[in-house]
Image: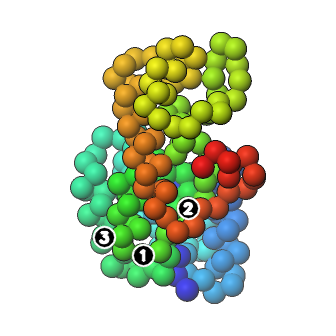
């Protein structure tokens, strides 16, 4: 079996990245071929557990390269790696999710709230409280009343559109993995 893991970064910044290093080592020990696609950082911690490593600068939504360039790079990687499945993680790019899902089975591990919240935190301000509202265009108004995302109209609109696109793409996937009932309820 060959798995293509996709994550925003390959560096050891946080829990997702440490999880991917441990997972790739275990899968490799079991004879699974693991390739990693990432948008920044260096995959030094992976040792020889990866079959291949592929940097696509600007893979995540906050970057400026064109989406077409990223999708073209992905097509080349798919031809080289011939993965059986893509295992997506912390990636905020609905176009990439949709592109991969149209070419092979995709499993998404939902580590956070980027698909369901323009700010990615699901936390309302003034007073501080967890957000229980579903993602919608009303989130734009909440940016002002509950200060839960950028108050700049341009940034708030961009963040809201990005989350709506991501949620739409993720909703079409056959399998989402979450670590808790709380995360399941937010999806």
C-alpha distance separating marks 2 and 3: 19 Å
Tell which of 116 and 3 is nearer to you.
116
Callout 2 secondary element = strand
Q: Position of residue 60 (x, y in %)?
A: 42, 47
Residue 62, disc:
none
- Pointer 2 residue: 108
Q: Crowding at label 2, few (<14), some or many (≥20) Cα neighbours within 10 Å? A: many
Q: Position of residue 29 (x, y in %)?
A: 69, 82
Which residue: 35% across, 63% down? 99
Residue 42 showing in the rendered view: no
Q: Position of residue 125 (x, y in %)?
A: 64, 18
What sort of colour scheme is used for the picture?
A: rainbow
Say above or below: 137 vs 51. Answer: above
1 or 3: tag closer to the N-terminus: 3
C-alpha distance separating marks 1 and 3: 11 Å
Tell which of 176 and 54 is nearer to you.
176
Which residue: 42% across, 75% down? 104
- 1 or 3: mark nearer the eye: 1
Tell which of 75 and 178 is nearer to you.
178
Residue 52 showing in the rendered view: yes
- Pointer 3 residue: 75
Q: Crowding at label 3, few (<14), some or many (≥20) Cα neighbours within 10 Å? A: some
Count of numbered circles on the image = 3
- Pointer 1 residue: 104
- 2 or 3: mark nearer the eye: 2
């Amino acid at each position: 079996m060959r798995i293509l893991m996709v994550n925003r970064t390959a560096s050891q910044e946080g829990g997702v990245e440490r999880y991917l290093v441990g997972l790739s080592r275990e899968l490799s020990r079991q004879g699974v071929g693991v390739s990693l696609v990432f948008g920044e950082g260096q995959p030094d911690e992976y040792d020889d557990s990866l079959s291949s490593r592929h940097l696509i600068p600007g893979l995540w939504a906050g970057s400026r390269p064109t989406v077409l360039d990223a999708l073209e790079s992905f097509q080349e990687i798919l031809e080289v790696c011939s993965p059986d499945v893509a295992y997506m993680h912390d990636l905020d790019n609905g176009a990439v999710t949709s592109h991969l899902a149209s070419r092979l089975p995709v499993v998404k591990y939902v580590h956070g709230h980027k698909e369901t919240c323009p700010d990615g935190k699901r936390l309302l301000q003034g007073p501080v409280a967890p957000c229980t509202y579903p993602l919608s265009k009303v989130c734009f108004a909440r940016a002002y009343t509950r200060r839960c995302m950028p108050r700049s109209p341009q940034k708030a609109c961009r963040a809201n559109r990005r989350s709506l696109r991501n949620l739409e793409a993720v909703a079409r996937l056959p399998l989402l993995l979450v670590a808790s009932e709380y995360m399941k309820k937010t999806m």
